[in-house]
Image (cartoon, rainbow, N blue to C red):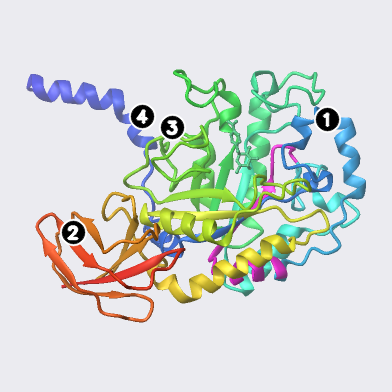
Amino acid sequence: MKIKHFLLYIFLLVVSPSFAQSYQPTDGNVAARQQFQDNKFGLFIHWGLFSTLADGEWVMNNRHIKKENYKRQLQSFDPVNFDAAKWVAAAKSAGMKYIVFITRHHDGFSNWDTHYSDWKITNTPYGKDVLKLLADECKKQNMKLGLYYSLLDWYRDDYPHETGRTGQETGRTAKSNYAAYLQFMKNQLTELLTNYGEIMSIWFDGHWDQTNVEGSKDMSPRIDWKYNEIYALIHRIQPNCLIGNNHHLSPLPGEDFQMFERDLPGQNKSGLSFQAASESLPLETCETMNKSWGYNIADTDYKTVKQCVQYLVNAAGRNTNFLLNVGPMSDGSIQPEFTDTLKAIGDWMNKYGESIYGTRGNIIEPQDWGVVTEKNKALYVHLLDASEKDYVFIPGIKSKIISAKLFNGNTPLKFKQQAEGVFVYIKNQPLDNTDTIIELNQK
Ligand code: JFZ
């Protein structure tokens, strides 16, 4: 054996265990990623036992509630107005193509009839498996369904609470046991992926509970979550299910999309988004209608329709899906301030969705004036800044442009293409204060 070959042999011996674990998405999974990107827009639903306290989904932690006291809410959680058809209709009215639903948030409460815990929706006066009702309705209305699942738990003793950044005041004294907790999560995930039909995605959250705060130099987790085992289980049961994890890091092996919380990729207004955007995986960003995820009776800081639409357009221009959140009330209904906005976003999508659905972004860098999306031969120039201009300059367009028009009304526009980019003349054209879309046709 030549020395070169010998060294290669030794190298392979050392690194092959990690090769053996490396994840190759199936063809179906790759196709699901494409469809996910085509769908662009989803409804996030934060709802569960916490909704009864009307103070957001972190209420147990923020108000220092002991689990014995928090537990009393079980008796009063009776969402008599829960109607899965209405939730799905609300998402449809906005032009959304998928829903991501909280199956279990940090308070540990399961929104389905799990066999592995008594702390669940079927032990409330309501008694029904809302996940089942929602999954059936989604299937009926051709709405994809993703499931949020918290890795962090403020309720269970076996969760490694001693090293948790949150949940320190819920009154747990027993020693944790991650092996037992991991098995519990695997059992629950198996239920979720076996009993509720096709699951578009599993949306993990809570990793950060076991790290220093975002932006710290050392972001290493204080426990080994064993994601390789969790992710392998998911992909074994449903290979097309897309795994994402709100760990605010670069994607880990086995993940199928990357998410951003309250930020567009490349921004960090929330202080949670220090990670760079993946160039290979689909991207998603989530934001909420007011300031809260779970129902908060005092939070009336509603976003306008314009803000929501512009966030969606800005996300699409950055090749990113938008997951917009509502927190339904404890009775199960979604408040009118949210449904009205959803409907108005849908009116916009009915007119302009062609420039969003099925497009890809990151065609050029985001500009001061807005972003560009692309589908087939069309480039959609989204002018989000409506300040009076005589022309728009779109830098870096290399393909030959053969025509330009206003998307709304089809008015042809004059343009000039140079090596540096394209000038489109819009003097005296009607500008839309939300988004003026110019369609360029490429040869
Ligand atoms: C997480 C959840 O905690 C929150 O309740 C909601 O579900 C959202 C979509 O995801 O948000 C976070 C994540 C991390 C921190 C704060 C909120 N953090 O590190 O402080």
Task: Kindly identify which numbered label has been placed on residue 17.
Answer: 4
Question: Can you say which quadrant of the picture contains the N terminus?
Answer: top left
Q: Nearer the viewer, mark 4 or mark 2?
A: 2
Q: Which mark is residue 274?
A: 3
Mark 3 / mark 1, whichever is N-terminal = 1
Please state which amino acid type lies under the numbered disc 2: Ile
Residue at 91% x, 39% y: name it: 72
Label 3 packing within 10 angstroms: few (<14), some (14-19), many (20+):
some
How much space separates mark 4 and mark 2, taking CA atoms? 45 Å
**Residue designated by label 2:** 397
- Left or right relative to 169: residue 393: left
Label 3 – label 4 distance at C-alpha: 30 Å
**Disc 2 residue lies near ligand 1 with CB under 8 A:** no
Mark 1 secondary-structure assignment: loop
User: What amino acid is found at the position of numbered circle 3 in the picture?
Assistant: Phe
Any part of residue 240 in sight: no
Mark 1 Cβ inside 8 Å of ligand 1? no
259 sits to left or right of 207:
left
Residue at the (16%, 58%) spot, across then down? 421
Q: Looking at the rendering, which quadrant does residue 10 occupy?
A: top left
Mark 3 and mark 1 in contact? Answer it, CB < 8 Å.
no
For ligand 1, which image quadrant applies? top right
Q: Is-magenta flag for residue 106? A: yes
Tell me if residue 35 comes above or below residue 364 in the rendering: below
Measured in 3D between alpha carbons, the distance from the residue under mark 2 to the one under mark 1, in whole angstroms, is: 57 Å
Residue topped by disc 1: 65
Q: Magenta stretch: give its range.
A: 86-108
Q: Which dot marks residue 81? A: none
Residue 251 visible, this angle: yes
